Amino acid sequence: MKHALIALLMLATPAMAHDQMAGTLHIIHPSIPLPAGMAKSAAGYVTISNEGESPEELVGVRSPFAASTTLHTTLFEDGIAKMRPLIGVTIAPGEVINLEPGGMHVMFMGLTGTVAEGDMIPATLIFRNAGEVAVEFMVDPADGVDHSTMDHSGY
């Protein structure tokens, strides 16, 4: 699976795929689907590969783009998508995790401004062992999902 993902990303245009290494972590295409103009929240996605020999854990995210930035997962209850906060996301050695639509993701709550497609949003991924890693979330075309209308209330 890891090799297929990397091959797919190599076929992507440079504007659509950006990645970086942070020690043994490969951080691939942090992105935010273009939020509606007056949206109060937005979802962020990223793929992270742990190419090291020790487990790692993504424990937080922060960004000046939002009043608060948290890790969430999507649960479906009676056909309704509900968001629940995550304390952290473990990445085993050799494992690839995807923060993606319909699953784990970053929630940017209380947006501090508007953005346009192609903008780069600064953020910091916070790992238990690797520490803080500065990244930029690319604003991709809208995916048709308005995350500001979903239930992010927690438990």
Image (spheres, helix red, strand yellow):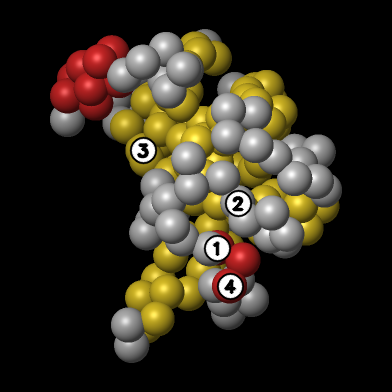
CB atoms of marks 1 and 2 within 8 Å:
yes
Asked if 98 appears above or below 27 in the picture, the reply is below
Dot 1: few (<14), some (14–19), or many (≥20) neighbours within 10 Å?
many
Task: Specify whether residue 12 is in view.
Answer: yes
Asked if 99 appears above or below 137 in the picture, the reply is below
Asked if 45 appears above or below 119 in the picture, the reply is below
Q: Residue at x 36, y 15 (%)?
A: 13
**At numbered mark 1, what does the secondary structure look like: helix, strand or loop?**
helix
Q: Which residue in the protein does label 1 denote?
A: 147
| Mark 1 to mark 2 CA distance (whole Å) | 8 Å
In-front residue for pair 30/14: 14
Kind of residue at disc 4: Thr
**At numbered mark 2, what does the secondary structure look like: helix, strand or loop?**
loop
Q: Which badge, 4 or 3, comes first in the chain's sequence? A: 3
Q: Which residue in the protein does label 3 denote?
A: 97
Kind of residue at disc 3: Ile
Q: Position of residue 7 (x, y in %)?
A: 21, 17
Dot 2: few (<14), some (14–19), or many (≥20) neighbours within 10 Å?
many
Of badges 1 and 3, nearer the viewer stands 1
Q: Which residue in the protein does label 4 denote?
A: 149
Q: Which badge, 1 or 2, comes first in the chain's sequence? A: 2
| Mark 2 to mark 4 CA distance (whole Å) | 12 Å
| Mark 4 to mark 1 CA distance (whole Å) | 5 Å
| Mark 2 to mark 3 CA distance (whole Å) | 24 Å
As drawn, which residue projects farthest toward the bottom? 78
CB atoms of marks 4 and 1 within 8 Å:
yes
CB atoms of marks 2 and 3 within 8 Å:
no
Q: Which residue in the protein does label 2 denote?
A: 35
